[in-house]
Image (cartoon, grey):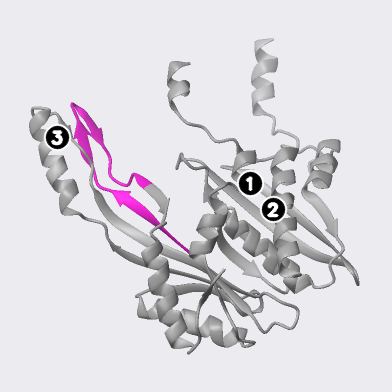
Amino acid sequence: MVASLLLYGCSTPQTPQDLLAPTDAQLKIRSIQTRTFDVKDRNAALRGVIASLQDLGFIIERANEPLGLVTAARFAEPNYYDVISVTVTVRQDTKDRLTIRANAIYNNKPIDDPKVYQNFFASLERSLFLTKE
Amino acid sequence: MLLTGCVTHTEPAELFQLTAETSKHRAMQTRFFETPNEKELLSASAAVLQDLGFQVEESVREVGFLRATKERSAREYGQYIQRALFLVLSFGKLLSPVDLHQKIATGLITRPLNQAATRQEVCIVFYRIVWKGDGQADRQYIPPGQQHMEMIRDPEIYQQFFAKLSKAVFLEAHTI
């Protein structure tokens, strides 16, 4: 018994083969994080994302137009020990439709609460609608 | 249980919600200009920030985005007086940490407001991160480097910025 335990301690752990394989949870969270919009102008959508994040009190850290990428963060006010970061990508699906995906992280833990994303997309819609006036 | 009760905790979902104060802050942080030239507005904004002592750290012209920072001392007389007062009142037991250093940062975005892009909006937010020095509470040493962050909500700072910007582009800054 002891010998087998010792032996077990020595063996190198096997890398699981399914390390990068998608799980059901991943697929579910992806659908929560993604919305499609009937918007033609990708640039305007990206600006809308930036504006709505700034409205929500996020600090824009990086933006990349060619890739349609925005990274932002904010403290979980009123406490300043926790940080929420979010990465949003805007991709053109078809000529008049685009997909927006948001990934939010609380400290270093991914947020999988659908409510968070619902709220984000609600304020984004407001911002996209504002630009169209 | 009691301890957790004392700490105010915000649910992540709440942080993605627009609050009653959002529009008030937005009005303070946003002006629009009657100009089709967004590039000029962005470069003038960068110039104004430079005049105010900021270093531009990130700029993306295609989405009209600027991020700039400046670092300054955060020492204030008031805090030193308070520290001395606490020290006396606690019979030398409490040496409260004071603010030492701060980084003032800003994020600015410009975007066209209408289809023809003859009207541009400029939205800027200022915030600061403050680092504290060390201190002592009874026998417990408080190490330096404790930091906190705050959004700057003083309307005057925003008014000053927009006054300078409107002078730089020879245009009137309209409030939303």
Specify whether residue B124 is in view. no
Query: Which range of residues does the magenta coloring cover?
Result: B125-147
Q: Position of residue B50 (x, y in %)?
A: 39, 79
Q: Which residue is drawn at 26% across and 36% down?
A: B142
Residue B86, disc: 3
Of the residues shown, which amino acid type is indicated by label 2?
Ser
Residues tagged by mark 1 and mark 2 found on one chain of the structure:
no
- Look at the numbered disc 1 and give the secondary structure of its residue: loop
Is residue A53 rendered to the left or right of residue B108?
Answer: right
Q: Position of residue A83 (x, y in %)?
A: 53, 45
Of the residues shown, which amino acid type is indicated by label 3?
Phe
Residue B16, disc: 1
| Viewport quadrant of the C terminus of chain B | bottom right
Residues tagged by mark 2 and mark 3 found on one chain of the structure:
no
Q: Nearer the viewer, mark 1 or mark 2?
A: 2
Of the residues shown, which amino acid type is indicated by label 1?
Phe
Q: Which residue is drawn at 26% across and 50% down?
A: B99
Tag 1 and tag 2, C-beta contact below 8 Å: yes
Q: In which quarter of the image is residue A70?
A: bottom right
How would you classify the magenta stretch by its main secondary structure? strand
